[in-house]
Image (cartoon, grey):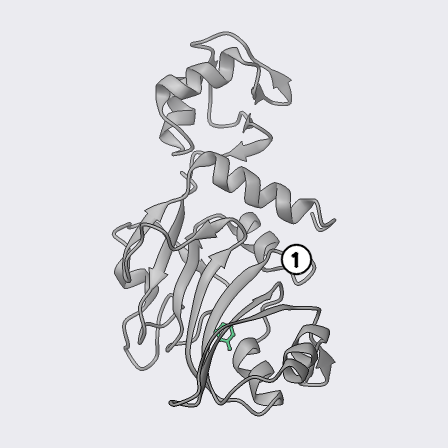
Amino acid sequence: MERLQKIIAKSGVTSRRKAENLITEGKVKVNGEVVLTLGTKVNENDTIEVDGIIISKEDKVYYLLNKPREVIAAVTDDKNRRTVIDLIKDDRRIYPVGRLDYDTTGLIILTNDGDFANLMMHPRNEIDKCYVAKIAGILTPREQMTLKNGVIIDGVKTKRARVKVRKIDKEANTSIVEITIHEGKNHQVRKMFEKVSHEVLKLKREKIAFLSTNGLKSGEYRKLNHKEVATLYSLAKSKGVQ
Ligand code: URA
């Protein structure tokens, strides 16, 4: 048996002091019942819920990594290339949530929480992902509209996207385009631009929902805090997929 606030702190969701506050604020449930008493003893079999999220003793962890180029977004690689797991100092069995191509840079979440990963990757969850692409050629307003309305990839039309041209370099004949999608089809952004006859020269994922690369240099990572994880959960759940 261990004290409730100690178990909450050990799970990584927050510090012990903050766990005590959460308990006194009535945000902690044990086996479905709100517990307000600090120091309540709990055991292995008790289900502990903090702010609506069930924590487990397995220490759930959530990282946000700014992936560099030439790193595989997978746990292992048959060609022995560097993977996102190699960049994170954590011995737990974490894995990336969704895909990012070997040559794509930017944000990727890693976790050992299977429920969270499934929820985030569900095609209907509509979590926005904002990419910035450097493409060959100048994207015309008509092509922008085509991308916005959806193009057919592998026989299926992509959902509505937000598209904004950030910069045009007439001399170099390239454009920098911001595109926000909420699906995760394989090579989706590259394929979408291919459909309007522009090659993607560089691709970066700048945002996942409200999370941005701010403060994270290439190759750097940080833990997501409890509030960020809870917000991602509620964003996905509000779209109806449990
Ligand atoms: N779309 C792509 O084409 N590649 C990525 O890595 C992510 C989205």
Describe residue 3's horizontal placement relative to residue 235 as left or right: left
Residue 71 position in % (x across, y down):
32, 72
Residue at x 63%, y 78% (from the top left corner): 144
Snapshot quadrant of residue 76: bottom left
Q: Nearer the viewer, residue 79 or 204?
A: 204
CB of residue at label 1: within 8 Å of ligand 1?
no
Snapshot quadrant of residue 162: bottom right
Q: Nearer the viewer, residue 142 or 242?
A: 142
Against 81, residue 231 (above or below) is above
Q: Which residue is mark 1?
A: 126
Residue at x 57%, y 49% (from the top left corner): 115
Q: Is residue 1 visible?
A: no
Against 81, residue 39 (above or below) is above
Residue at x 49%, y 40% (from the top left corner): 228
**Residue with the most extreme front position:** 170
Task: Point out the image quarter for the N terminus.
Answer: top left
Describe residue 14's horizontal placement relative to residue 152 as left or right: left
Residue 182 position in % (x across, y down):
62, 63
Q: Amino acid at mark 1?
A: Glu
Q: Secondary structure at mark 1?
A: loop
Describe residue 197's horizontal placement relative to residue 172 as left or right: right
Q: Is residue 46 visible?
A: yes
Describe residue 148's horizontal placement relative to residue 190 as left or right: right
Q: Nearer the viewer, residue 202 or 227?
A: 202
**Residue with the most extreme bottom position:** 197
> Total of numbered circles in the picture?
1
Residue at x 60%, y 81% (from the top left corner): 192
Against 66, residue 104 (above or below) is below
Residue 123 position in % (x across, y down):
66, 63
> Local crowd at mark 1 within 10 Å, few (<14), some, or many (≥20)?
many
Against 191, residue 223 (above or below) is above
Residue 174 position in % (x across, y down):
44, 85
